[in-house]
Image: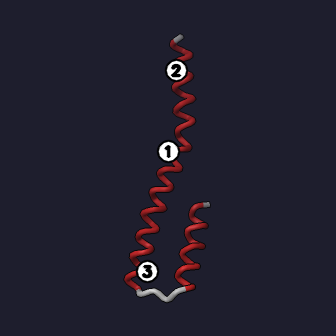
Amino acid sequence: MINKLIKKWMVMILHTYILPEGLTKSFKASVKVKKQLLLEMQKEIDEDPESKKAKLEAKRKDN
């Protein structure tokens, strides 16, 4: 989902305006870094409920 939105946004901007090549490369690099950060955040969010569940099960076993 995030990938599709980023690609659509990049295509829209790059086709709407004529940008110098250096600026385009910089923009793409920036988007790539932000995309990676978002994917890492999404992974942490997805793992968080699993870790909470595991901790609750461990506490139940201790009692």
Q: Residue at x 54, y 30 (%)?
A: 52
Q: What is the three-letter code of the residue carrying label 1?
A: Glu
Distance between the alpha carbons at the discs numbered 2 and 3: 51 Å
Residue 44's mark? 1
**Disc 2 target residue:** 58
Which label's residue is closer to the chain start, 1 or 2?
Answer: 1
Label 1 residue SS:
helix
**Disc 3 target residue:** 24
Q: Residue at x 49, y 56 (%)?
A: 38
Q: In this image, 22 relative to 31: left or right?
A: left
User: With respect to residue 13, does 52 lie above or below?
Assistant: above
Q: In this image, 32 relative to 3: left or right?
A: left
- Residue 39 % position (x, y): 50, 55
Label 2 residue SS:
helix
**Alpha-carbon neighbours of circle 1 within 10 Å: few (<14), some, or many (≥20)?**
few
Which label's residue is closer to the chain start, 3 or 1?
Answer: 3
Which label's residue is closer to the chain start, 2 or 3?
Answer: 3
Residue 25's mark? none
Q: Residue furthest top?
A: 63
Distance between the alpha carbons at the discs numbered 3 and 1: 30 Å
Residue 57, quarter of the rendered image: top right
Distance between the alpha carbons at the discs numbered 1 and 2: 20 Å
User: With respect to residue 44, does 19 lie above or below?
Assistant: below
